Amino acid sequence: MTDRRALLAGLGVAGLLTVAACGTGSEPTAAPEPSAETSTARTEVTGTRLAVSYDGGVMVLDQDTLEPVADIPLEGFLRLNPAGDQRHVLVSTSEGFQVLDTGVEVQGHGDHNHYYDTGATLTDVVHPAPEPGHVVRHAGKVALFSDGAGTVALLDPEEVAAGPAEPTWTAPSPHHGVAVPLEDGGMVVSVGTEEERTGAAALDASFTDVTRSDECPGLHGEATAGNGAVLLGCTDGVLLFKDGSFTKVPSPDEYGRIGNQAGSEHSDVVLGDYKTDPDAELERPTRVSLTDTETGELRLVDLPASYSFRSLGRGPEGEALVLGTDGKLHVIDPDSGEITSSIQVTEEWQEPLQWQQPRPTLAVEGEIAYVTEPETSELHVVYLPTGEVVDTATLPHEPNEITGVGEAVAGEHDHEHAEGDEHAHEGEEHAAEGEEHGE
């Protein structure tokens, strides 16, 4: 593993060196005299942390050294979703959404933050949810959807560790669904049953149905754009909610399924997957979709390789990112659809048939893209502004899912609900990036 801080400093990336002097001017600033409070203070660290699941538990990694600061045994297949408070991660278990404290307290200080180690731990707080599904952060809230109960718990991210949450809203019928918090205090929610999902409804702040659309068969996956528009994936395109109404944006194919999506606060264009074979046991798509939420235009982009439900992300300027099975991170201009660069990160790989199985996975935190390589148990670090792989570390376990804690929830514009699997509902698809759950 390289000295990444030194390397980034050599690249002129001062902004990533988060523990910096707080004085002004060019003269050195004397350290303050220790007080009774600071003499017993916590240890200051360089930034927030990463969570990585494996078969048997969850690792919490230091973002700078990539060394595990905690290795927590936990049984079952684990989904990971940031809670939106820059500290906690929601772990989907058989009981519901359990709160993982990554152990870093973020304190703002003018134009930068300070980070203090509080000790990473899996808390006893579990938000009850039979068949925990999508976690969506938007508009200063985080929504937890229980597929088994059809309930939504709508929370302030700062309160996720305070104790189990009561359901805020209950769907007429349990289903593999999703809820997107809105700026007015309402939500956009999926409409469906255990057998099928048919569309979506918009609820006001009292959770009264104000408008709906049945033009989204097989609804799965969501993202929000920089303009606040909500995009929902369908088997025949996408359903756009904007300015209080729904608009259907059809795909160019009769069956043109869009599920996993990634939005950005810096772009009105949403990146999505694109599949055209309803009968495939596992389709290996080589096109992605770009939907302009201002114009309603849906553009398809051809890629030189296929990708999986954990391959989509957005860069610091809104660029669309796709991790291909050729081992390259493809960078796409969301406005033109042009592939502007392709960064070699891993060896070539093939998507496994079972969506729960590990495969190279992309997670983006600011200007850094983290890419797992399960075959070698490695984690690669890509500095996106230069397109360079600046670090690689070998992990003690084969990585499966990976997530950071993200920016504060007000700035979240991607669907982060492990979009990857229809939980197993459609064979391979829900939750950060997969596909109908695994997809």
Image (tube, rainbow, N blue to C red):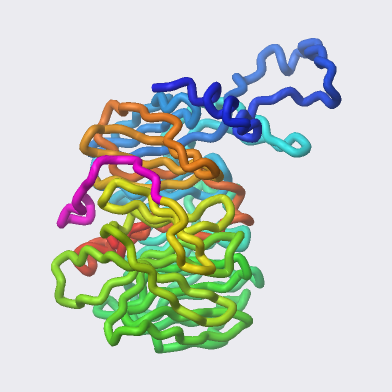
Does residue 100 appear in this view? Answer: yes
User: Residue at coordinates 55% horizontally, 58% vertically from top-left?
Assistant: 318
Horizontal side of 8 relative to 67 (left or right) equals right
User: Residue at coordinates 45% horizontally, 84% vertically from top-left?
Assistant: 249
Look at the image and say whether residue 19 sits in the magenta stretch: no
What stretch of residues is rendered in magenta? 342-357
Quadrant housing the C terminus: bottom left
Marks counted in the figure total: 0
Does residue 125 appear in this view? Answer: no
Residue closer to the observer: 160 or 412: 412
In the rendered image of this protein, does residue 271 appear above or below residue 373? below
User: Residue at coordinates 25% horizontally, 35% vertically from top-left?
Assistant: 398
Residue closer to the observer: 136 or 338: 338
Q: Residue 304 sits in which quadrant?
A: bottom left
Quadrant housing the N terminus: top left
Q: Main secondary structure of the magenta part?
A: loop
